[in-house]
Amino acid sequence: MGEDIKKATLGGGCFWCIEAVYEEVDGVLSVRSGYSGGEEENPTYALVSSGKSDHAEVVQIEYDSSKISYEEILDIFWNIHNPTTLNRQGNDIGVQYRSVIFYHDLLQKEIALNSKKEASKKFRDEIVTQIVPLETFYEAEGYHQDYFSKNPNQGYCQLVIAPKVDKFRDGHRDKLKKGQK
């Protein structure tokens, strides 16, 4: 990985929703859905979705830091989910849907803490997002990758993901990849 290529690992509810937004962001090279934050090695979707593994559904974003900064990655994060609800995003309830930033190094930790402090000015309720070190990222099963782009007509995609993507597009045209504006 070149020095401009960095990673960010974030959880903000269902990983399909977060993945769908970041896949449209200029400077983002790849987005992988997965699991992190629990003790179970090589967790499965069935285990994580049961809430018994303590893993969160997350995305790992590989990005070109010469095009988009970690701060900008986090600014998007605060705007595409509700960081004030503990272990919940909409109808998705459980520890696996918690709001969490897994930092990769101490600089990311510092930036995340500052970003959270700034973001808290925009919310009436307290932000409950965890900021913790990344220990291990486990990539989710293949059928979870690029879920929205592969299943745009599926019910959950139409009712939950599409409105989030549309809202992001409307408010962040300057951040979209070419051809997505």
Image (tube, rainbow, N blue to C red):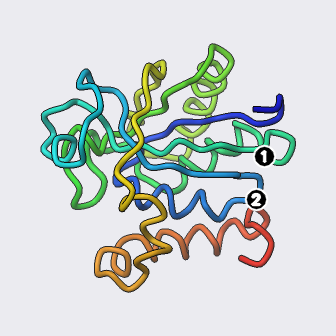
Residue 119 location (% of width, % of height): 57, 40
Q: Secondary structure at mark 2?
A: loop
Q: Secondary structure at mark 1?
A: loop
Q: Position of residue 140 (x, y in %)?
A: 37, 47
State the residue at coordinates (57%, 29%): 117
Image coords of residue 76 (percent x, y): 61, 51
Seen at 55% across and 24% down, the residue is: 103
Q: Is residue 69 above or below residue 171?
A: above
User: Mark 2 highlights which residue?
Assistant: 26
Q: Which mark is residue 121?
A: none
Seen in the image, is 2 located left or right of residue 151? right
Q: Nearer the viewer, residue 82 or 166?
A: 166
What kind of residue is marked 1?
Answer: Ile
Q: Give the quadrant of residue 150.
A: bottom left
Quarter of the figure that contains the N terminus: top right
Q: Which image quarter is the C terminus in?
A: bottom right
Q: Residue 155 at what x, y percent from top left?
A: 29, 81
At label 2, the amino acid type is: Asp
Q: Earlier in the sequence, mark 2 or mark 1?
A: 2
Residue 24 placement: quadrant: bottom right
Q: Is residue 40 left or right of residue 65?
A: left
Front residue of 149 and 115: 149
Which residue is situated farthest in the right direction here? 66
**Residue contact between numbered discs 2 and 1, judged by CB atoms under 8 Å:** yes
> Which mark, by number, is residue 68?
1
